[in-house]
Image (cartoon, helix red, strand yellow):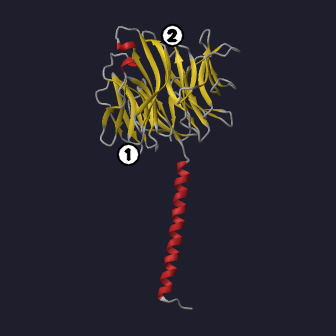
Amino acid sequence: MHLSKKSLIVVLVVIVIILCTFITALSGQSKSTKAKVKRIAYVKNNNIWLMKASGASKQKLTSFSEGTNKISNLAFCPNGRKIAFVYTDQSDSLRIYNLNTGQTSSNLAGSLSSVDCLTWRSNTKLIFDGLGNSSLIKKTNANIYQLDLTNNSVSQLINEHGLEPRVSPDKKRLAYVSIKLKNNNPNNYLGYESLKYLNFKNHKTKTVRRSVIEITLDGRAFNNPRWSPNSKKIVTHSTGSDVSGGINTYALSGKKLGGFFTSQKNGYLAYGFAEFLDNNRLVYKCCNAAYATKYYLRMSKINGTKTKTIKRDKFSVWRAGDLSVSISKQTLLFATYNLATSKPRNIYSYGFKSKKIKKLVSGADLPVWQP
């Protein structure tokens, strides 16, 4: 049987459509599979490295001189193709490593002498706090800035002194801490510390909580605000004798949802950097209140109940930036830190479901999940 020319064209068109559909499906499957492969960035010997979640395929990204670590504040952009970090040598230099090109850009913060707390608003906008003069006291003089990579410009984002910014997971708000002197009097040792957030859409700020603090002391009412996965809660921790200590969780309305300081059962002090494991659970560090010689990494509900110890370490302490949670992989990354020698020790992973700890790399710290 012979097909007419018209029929043959129709058959060929159908075949082409089927082939295109098949190729598209394979491509989509390949992209989907690739998207599931999460890697971990970390710092070792003054360089940034990348490895698989299993700890395999370790790859050195940067080529700085090995020695005392000068790298801090690792932060992936939302698409996972750029890593922002701070390199400190006499003064802070804001830099970005591009995974696509293998190149590192430097000194993106211009004349700012101090740069800290990097958080991405989008793939082209990076937010951080900084000082123009390194001799100033950070907690009363820091400002929050935004770097726009489309034109490499830096602008002040909020019209007040603020520090420790953190973009919400839904990218709609920015949590930060505001500290100012009472009556704006430089001779007054009392001040106000507030937990606030900025709405990116209307550029309005809202105060979640405010506390009176003594500026001359190291006490802080709110430290390192962190968002819940649903962007509806903020957790902070307080330090120092001049403020009520502990870990506290707040709704955006200002309502306190949970908080705890010491466990009456065992006398252990809950303090320091905290992260959400999910919308109702936290991971944080604590120590024995009497001597601070033993440190614990623990998880609990936001009100401090149903506590579980993940790891105990006699000589180590976990610092801000040494915890990273992957909600999708249900895995926590954490790094221990030698308090006596100020040297990093090991990076571990902890599976929420398996409840098992795995050592991934030694002599390293600052682990962070690739989005």
Q: Nearer the viewer, mark 1 or mark 2?
A: 2
Element type at mark 1: loop
Element type at mark 2: loop
Task: Give, as a three-letter code, the residue at label 1.
Answer: Thr
Dots 1, 2 in contact, CB < 8 A: no
At 59% from the left and 39% from the top, the residue drawn is: 327
Above or below: residue 304 compared with residue 149: above
In the image: residue 231, left or right of residue 176:
right
Of the image marks 1 and 2, the number of the one nearer the N terminus: 1
Indicate the position of residue 102 as horizontal and vertical percent values: 39, 43
Quadrant of the drawing holding the N terminus:
bottom right
Residue 205: quadrant of the picture: top left
Mark 1 to mark 2 CA distance (whole Å): 49 Å
Outermost bottom residue:
1
Could one spot residue 114 in this view of the protein?
A: no
Task: Give, as a three-letter code, the residue at label 2.
Answer: Asp
Of residue 113 and residue 362, the one placed in the foreground of this image is 113
Q: Label 1 crowding class (10 Å Cα cut-off): few <14, some 14-19, many 20+?
A: few
Q: Label 2 crowding class (10 Å Cα cut-off): few <14, some 14-19, many 20+?
A: some
Could one spot residue 260 in this view of the protein?
A: yes
Which residue is identified by label 1? 101
Indicate the position of residue 179 as horizontal and vertical percent values: 42, 19
At 38% from the left and 19% from the top, the residue drawn is: 138
Which residue is identified by label 2? 242
Above or below: residue 35 compared with residue 176: below
At 55% from the left and 46% from the top, the residue drawn is: 37
Indicate the position of residue 164 as horizontal and vertical percent values: 44, 26
Of residue 42 and residue 206, the one placed in the foreground of this image is 206
Residue 180: quadrant of the picture: top left
In the image: residue 116, left or right of residue 286:
left
